[in-house]
Image: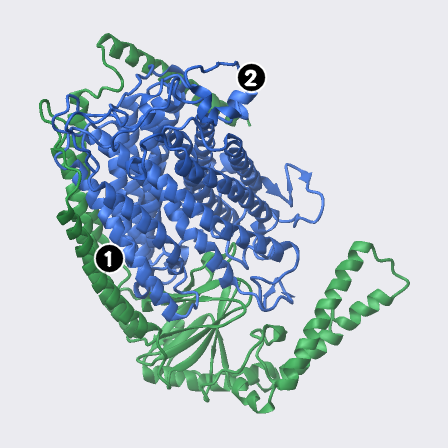
Chain colours: A blue, B green
């Protein structure tokens, strides 16, 4: 079955050999199955991380109050008498961030949709390497498993099983140093209980995750460059493919840097090196480490960390471009400007990382360089936003659930994007750095936007993935609960941040000691935020139900349910190896010929030849 | 355990019930010959109207929060630097809030207006260079203004302090802050973590503290001599693992000792005076109004961040090297209390970089005194300098001062 990727295989005579359960569902090398595996794993991880956020939001809204919900999920050790332990609060925050950023948004968006759409939209039989593709998923699955297991570390062992050898087997709970795992907090087991074995597992999990992501990204790049079908020039590729392509390049260039950061941290933890440590006394012990710098870690971390934002965001923007054009029955406005913006964002994302570090004591002049580069990103972002808005202008909009989520993405991209201008400006960043303003900003601009992109993608391509339709009405209810919940959570959060509430605080009782007014404001808003968070979390259950129910019981999908132009809708509903039963389709036009004057239908698929006298437009 | 089981059971039964309802809905849809992928006009119009309604709710909610809390919910800035950043912040907020309203309005309004209508075809428009040029150039021009103003403020805020700025060290450790005033000479004595010992909590370098640290590491409890004695004692049985721990420990101690001797050989006794007159202050940081300050920030263990919310100042504390921060307070605590109409109000120094379990409790009260009150307080403190604390026999009794009032009221 590895040969299906080859061109000569499927000309006319496609042999259907029966496969076993294992090779079809588990160690599958078919890109469509691997994409679904990514999606299911990511959705599972996403729900774990969402549950965590509701748990710590309960603590923030009703600090110190006993909650049976907390003891139900966390047990007596982490929530004695139903009150969350302060170190576990940090553990929950850390794992929520890590899982959401890497496992839901990176794995779920790029992993799922690059896999499903790259071969289908390019007219390829499969990925360049089916085997590496399978490997990339299994690395992802293994790292997910290790990350989940790290939450069960108890006295340096998991479920009572001791780990042989000297692996830093001490400590309780998962990593607790924030998702950015800054040393020395993450390097010293004496500093916090999660910096024991839990932190070691975090680092191992991330190292495996990165390996998987690299294999996947290289595969995507090679496929996009080499396996485009006849006529599919680079400037006829759907914007989805452009974003996956640039995302994969970003991943290949930036993830290795995180790997080196993680490896050096592992060395500091287990081998006694001093890459990040210098002149430290902790727990009454004078360490001999000298000459390292915690700031080095931050440079390395954010050299990945910032491109990571776009690794998460670009696929979401690509999916929404496709969905908005299709459901507005109108070409995406400024196709080439969109490509230019994607490339510009991709390039700039590499030279802005320092804006996370304005107040680390970094030379202020270096800071001003990063101010300049960071604010430049607003230009291609603005171009994208205006192009989306112009696309729906004078369109003929059809509000499928996917379309609603795609439009909501544009809204959150704006709302979260504009606050980025404040944070990118170093002089202003001083006053709000590490407050809830930052939390609100990145949750809206990359969290919500990417999640909305993910939902939009799932609703839109579900018929392609499972051959069935999701329930539209449930999709509507899910959408409206989600967007109201999301804004209800993150709008008030800006005000909490401006009032000066630092992030990662277990509670804000400290405010009661110096400013009662602000304390009351923070507490009021925290209750509102948590209430919306719980509503939004419950709303996701509708999605979960709809998703799994429709896989088995949804109505059978037609071949091209959304009357779309791209090639994936020319394949049969029933999945087959090699995607197209006969010859590969040939491409004659760009993917956005919607409502073209003179055409009979309001869409012309890419494989339809130009009519007599028709001019190809861009 | 039973309750968990019961809850799970209820969830499963609930899911099954919903599944049945969906089934019924789908059967009726089939009867009406509705295909799932065909969005009926009724649903389509409803959603377009909901988009507009959502915009109204979104804008309304935002305006409500703005009116109730304002973007200056944190009150007026209490430092010169803070006032200039606040001015810039307000300008930036006006720009971004305008953009927020404008673009979100276009988005949701178009979503409402251009909903599919029978017989109306979408307008085929692939690109328009003039339009695209406009929305590239206009944001670029606005950003240029933002960048120029931002960098100007940034240079002012981070530039060198005036020569007469009062030097104060802020020393962070899990989970508290300690301040050290430079004393009459306004020069902070050097410090090094290897000298942290007993009543030299900040590791201040003087000839005496060097000597006592060397002595402690050689002969003190758990020092080199005692470890060697244990290792050489043939009567006690030491396990292999304990042996390796002890030899590592011994190696570390010997290394630290070498470094201490090195430090001692380069330490000039004339520098001692810089250190002895330093004043160490815990719990509350007192500042003199209208006086420039230069803070030197150090950490003993992990990253911390000195966050002076009301002065709009923040800088990380990084173990291994010092960072600096400057500001000039302009409003005394008493004035701010009147301004805010809140008699219990205090300025605060919080930790704003995750540093462990009790991170959220790590703070230090800050009190800005008028020039006269501060000078009186400082005078009373001059006799309680590092020397007096290090050699406790000579401790004089503290005298009361004009600052007592504020000191007491911070405890409210």
Circle 2 Cα neighbour tier, 10 Å, few/some/many (<14 / 14–19 / ≥20) = few
- Image side of residue B158 versus residue B237, left or right: left
Q: Position of residue A263 (x, y in %)?
A: 58, 52
Instruction: For mark 2, give the secondary structure.
Output: loop
Residues tagged 1 and 2 counted as in contact (Cβ below 8 A): no
- The answer to whether residue B52 of the structure is visible from this angle is no
User: Hey, which residue is sitting farthest left in the picture?
Assistant: B119
- Image side of residue A128 versus residue B165, left or right: right
Chain letter belonging to callout 1: B
Instruction: For mark 1, give the secondary structure.
Output: loop
Tell me the residue at 52%/13% (across/down): A18
Q: Position of residue A185 (x, y in %)?
A: 54, 57
- The answer to whether residue A556 of the structure is visible from this angle is yes
Which residue is tagged 1?
Answer: B71
Q: Is residue A500 above or below residue B178?
A: above
User: Hey, which residue is sitting farthest right in the picture?
Assistant: B235
Which residue is tagged 2?
Answer: A20
Tell me the residue at 51%/27% (across/down): A29
């Amino acid at each position: 079955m590895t040969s299906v990727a080859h061109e000569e295989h499927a000309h006319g005579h496609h042999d259907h050999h029966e496969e076993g359960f294992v090779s079809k569902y588990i160690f599958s090398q078919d890109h469509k199955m691997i994409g679904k595996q990514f999606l299911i794993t990511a959705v599972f991880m996403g729900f774990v991380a969402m549950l965590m956020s509701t748990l710590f939001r309960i603590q923030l809204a009703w600090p110190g109050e006993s909650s049976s919900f907390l003891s139900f999920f966390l047990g007596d050790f982490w929530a004695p008498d139903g009150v969350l332990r302060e170190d576990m609060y940090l553990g929950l925050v850390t794992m929520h961030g890590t899982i959401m950023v890497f496992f839901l948004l990176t794995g779920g968006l790029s992993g799922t949709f690059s896999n499903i759409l790259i071969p289908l939209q390019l007219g390829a039989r499969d990925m360049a390497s089916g085997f590496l593709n399978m490997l990339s998923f299994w690395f992802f699955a293994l790292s997910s498993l290790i990350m989940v297991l790290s939450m069960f570390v108890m006295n340096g062992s998991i479920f009572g099983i001791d780990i042989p050898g000297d692996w830093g087997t001490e400590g309780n709970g998962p990593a607790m140093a924030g998702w950015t795992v800054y040393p020395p907090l993450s390097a010293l087991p004496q500093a916090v209980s999660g910096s024991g074995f839990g932190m070691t597992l975090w680092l191992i999990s991330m190292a495996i995750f990165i390996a998987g992501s690299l294999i996947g990204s290289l595969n995507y790049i090679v496929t996009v460059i080499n396996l485009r079908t006849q006529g599919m020039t680079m400037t006829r590729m759907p914007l989805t493919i452009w974003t996956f392509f640039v995302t994969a390049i970003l991943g290949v260039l930036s993830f290795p840097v995180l790997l080196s950061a993680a490896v050096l941290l592992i060395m500091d933890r287990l081998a006694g090196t001093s890459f990040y440590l210098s002149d430290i006394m902790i727990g009454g012990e004078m360490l001999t480490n000298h000459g390292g710098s915690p700031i080095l870690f931050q440079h390395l971390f954010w050299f990945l960390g910032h491109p990571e934002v776009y690794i998460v965001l670009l696929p979401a923007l690509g999916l929404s471009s496709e969905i908005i054009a299709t459901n507005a029955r109108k070409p995406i406005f400024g196709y080439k400007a969109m490509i230019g913006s994607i490339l510009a964002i991709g390039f700039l994302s590499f030279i802005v990382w320092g804006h996370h570090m304005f107040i680390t004591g970094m030379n202020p002049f270096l800071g001003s360089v990063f101010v300049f580069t960071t604010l430049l990103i607003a230009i291609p972002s603005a171009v994208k936003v205006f192009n989306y808005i112009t696309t729906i202008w004078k369109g003929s909009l059809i509000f499928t659930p996917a379309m609603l989520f795609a439009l909501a993405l544009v809204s959150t991209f704006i709302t979260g994007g504009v606050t980025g201008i404040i944070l990118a400006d170093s002089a202003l960043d001083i006053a709000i750095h590490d407050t809830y303003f930052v939390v609100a900003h990145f949750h809206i601009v990359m969290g919500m936007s990417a999640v909305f992109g993910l939902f939009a993608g799932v609703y839109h391509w579900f018929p392609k993935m499972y051959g069935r339709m999701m329930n539209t009405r449930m999709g509507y209810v899910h959408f409206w609960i989600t967007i109201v919940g999301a804004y209800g959570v993150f709008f008030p959060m800006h005000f909490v941040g401006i009032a000066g509430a630092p992030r990662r605080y277990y509670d804000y009782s400290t405010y009661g000691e110096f400013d009662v007014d602000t304390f009351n404001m923070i507490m009021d808003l925290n209750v509102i935020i948590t209430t919306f968070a719980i509503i939004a979390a419950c709303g996701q259950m509708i999605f979960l139900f709809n998703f799994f129910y429709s896989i088995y019981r949804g109505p059978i999908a037609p071949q091209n349910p959304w009357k779309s132009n791209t090639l994936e809708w020319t394949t049969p509903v029933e999945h087959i190896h090699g995607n197209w039963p006969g010859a590969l389709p040939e491409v004659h036009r760009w993917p956005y010929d919607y409502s073209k004057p003179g055409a009979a239908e309001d869409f012309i698929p890419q494989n339809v030849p130009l009519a007599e006298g028709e001019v190809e437009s861009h | 355990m039973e309750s968990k089981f019961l809850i799970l059971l209820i969830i499963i039964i609930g899911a099954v019930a919903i599944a049945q309802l969906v089934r019924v809905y789908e059967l009726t849809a089939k009867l009406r010959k509705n295909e799932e992928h065909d969005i009926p006009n009724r649903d389509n119009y409803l959603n377009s109207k909901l988009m507009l309604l959502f915009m109204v709710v979104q804008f309304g909610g935002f305006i409500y929060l703005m009116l109730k809390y304002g973007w200056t919910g944190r009150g007026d800035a209490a430092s010169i630097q803070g006032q200039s950043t606040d001015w810039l912040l307000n300008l930036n907020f006006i720009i971004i809030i305008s953009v927020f309203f404008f673009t979100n309005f276009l988005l949701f309004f178009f979503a409402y207006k251009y909903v599919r209508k029978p017989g109306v075809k979408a307008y085929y428009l692939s690109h328009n260079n003039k339009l695209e040029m406009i929305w590239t150039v206009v944001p670029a021009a606005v950003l240029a203004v933002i960048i120029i103003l931002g960098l100007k403020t940034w240079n002012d805020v981070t530039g060198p302090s005036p020569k007469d700025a009062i030097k104060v060290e802020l020393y962070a450790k899990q989970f508290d802050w300690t301040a050290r005033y430079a004393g009459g000479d306004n020069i902070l004595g050097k410090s090094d973590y290897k000298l942290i010992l007993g009543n030299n909590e900040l590791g201040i370098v003087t000839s005496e503290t060097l000597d006592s640290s060397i002595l402690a590491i050689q002969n003190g409890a758990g020092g080199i001599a005692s470890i060697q004695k244990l290792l050489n004692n043939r009567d006690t049985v030491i396990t292999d693992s304990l042996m390796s721990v002890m030899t590592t420990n011994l190696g570390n101690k010997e290394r630290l000792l070498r470094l201490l001797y090195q430090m001692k050989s380069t330490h000039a006794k004339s520098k001692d005076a810089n250190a002895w007159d330093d004043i160490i202050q815990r719990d509350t940081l007192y500042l003199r109004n209208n006086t420039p300050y230069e803070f030197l920030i150090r950490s003993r263990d992990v990253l911390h961040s000195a966050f002076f919310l009301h002065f709009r100042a923040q800088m990380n504390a990084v173990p291994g090297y010092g960072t600096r921060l400057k500001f000039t307070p302009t409003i005394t605590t008493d004035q701010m209390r009147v301004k805010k109409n809140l008699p219990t109000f205090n300025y605060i120094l919080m930790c704003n970089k995750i540093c462990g379990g009790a991170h959220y409790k790590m703070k230090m009260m800050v009190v800005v005194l008028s020039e006269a009150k501060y000078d009186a307080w400082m005078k009373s403190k001059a006799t309680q300098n590092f020397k007096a604390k290090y050699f406790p026999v000579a401790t004089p009794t503290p005298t009361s001062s004009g600052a007592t009032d504020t000191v007491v009221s911070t405890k409210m």
